[in-house]
Amino acid sequence: MLFWSLGQSIITPTARVPPVYFADEATDTKLREITPCNNGRYLPDSSTAEQTQKQIKILDEFAESRGLKFVEVDQCNRLRYCYLCGLIKPDRTHHCMSCGACVVKFDHHCPWINKCVSHNNYKFFVLYLLYSCILIAWCILTSAECVIRYFLQQQWIGGLLNILLVAFAVILCAIFAYYPLGQLLIYHIRLASLNETTCEQAKPPNIRCVVM
């Protein structure tokens, strides 16, 4: 199950943004014309109040024309537009700089599996952490039996040096089981119970206020 969950975490396709969220060329051009740019990098947060209002209007009109609904906005109450991908980010979507694309329900980019942990493979990633902790716990328990038997019965064949090496390996496994694997598993179980991602906990989303 450990290797199955690891394999699924790796081979499951990353959750990409559907084509309907991609802006047409005219909309993208209008947004870029009224957004500050520095060395090819667009900086919407540096926009003036007038530019911000124009951006909000363009994005809202585009979303309405496509029948798209959003709850999440940026700090200026704009729909979150990705100038790198040319799309309006759906709720809970973030741009991964490692992958160079926007990812739906982005949690983090994991260097160990060299892939984004997102909507499609998050379950398999948590299962991988769980099975890893179970495997290490099993190794600790089966190895600790030898150490305990030696000190209780003084019948360990390999002598003191060998048993000390086994004890050292058990201690290392116990440390690794607690940190980082154990703490990472507890952390993600807590996130799942709160319906949050790592990215959202680091930077809570802004929710659009609708005046009735």
Image (cartoon, helix red, strand yellow):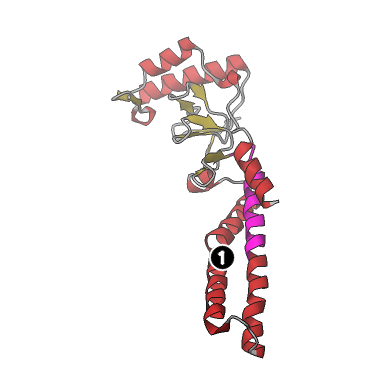
Residue nearest the viewer, comparing 90 with 182:
182
Q: How many marks?
A: 1
146 to the left or right of 164: right
Queried whether the magenta region covers residue 60, the answer comes back as: no
Name the residue tied to disc 1. 178
Q: Residue furthest top?
A: 26
Q: Is residue 187 above or below residue 7?
A: below
Magenta residues: mostly which secondary structure? helix
x%, y% of residue 88? 52, 24
- Is disc 1 surrounded by few (<14), some (14 to 19) or many (20+) residues within 10 Å? some
x%, y% of residue 112? 52, 47
Q: Is residue 143 above or below residue 16?
A: below
Residue nearest the viewer, comparing 60 with 37:
37
Q: Residue furthest left?
A: 39
Q: Quadrant of the C terminus?
A: top right
x%, y% of residue 82? 46, 26
Queried whether the magenta region covers residue 123, the answer comes back as: yes
Residue nearest the viewer, comparing 9 with 208:
9
Q: Quadrant of residue 18?
A: top right
x%, y% of residue 170? 57, 72
Q: Is residue 201 above or below residue 137?
A: above
What's under tag 1, amino acid-wise? Answer: Tyr
Magenta range is: 118-136
Q: Is residue 124 above or below residue 66?
A: below
